[in-house]
Amino acid sequence: MKEKVIDSKKYLDAAEFLKVTAHEVRLGLLQFLLVNGPTNVTTLYQKFGMPQSSMSQHLAKLKQAKIIRGDRKGFSITNF
């Protein structure tokens, strides 16, 4: 009988994804970006009615986990 090998990296990646997305604002951000496409942070914090600094922190967590990315054009960053 062949011994099963557990791919711990796969489970660590999945756990990190769940941890990062287990917040109502970040779930809402993902849903908004999926429906509306690439959007800048100004639009996002206005739509969500929260301070720009808080929105930027949520976006940073999603970017750090490589769930979304942001493209900079001058002073504007578009997230998708």
Image: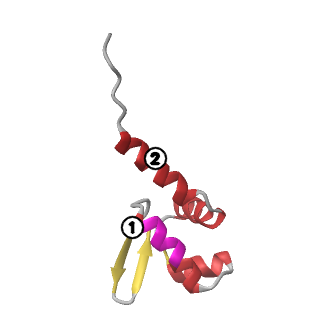
**Above-or-below relation of 18 to 33:** above
Q: How is the image coloured?
A: secondary structure
Q: Quadrant of the C terminus?
A: bottom left
* Left or right: 72, with 26 as reference point: left
Of the residues shown, which amino acid type is indicated by label 2?
Ala
**Residue 69 vs residue 24, the one in the foreground:** 24
Q: Which residue is mark 1?
A: 69
- Of residue 5 and residue 69, the one placed in the foreground of this image is 5
Q: Find residue 36 and report its image quarter.
A: bottom right
Write down the region rendered in magenta: 57-63
Amino acid residing under circle 1: Arg
Name above or below for residue 62 compared with residue 9. Answer: below
Residue at horizontal 35%, vertical 74%? Answer: 71
Which of the 4 image quarters holds residue 32?
bottom right
Residue at image location 37% in from the left, 41% down from the top:
8
The answer to whether residue 12 is left or right of residue 56 is left
Residue 5 location, x and y as percent?
33, 28
Residue ranking furthest to the left: 2
Looking at the image, tell me whether mark 1 or mark 2 is earlier in sequence order.
2
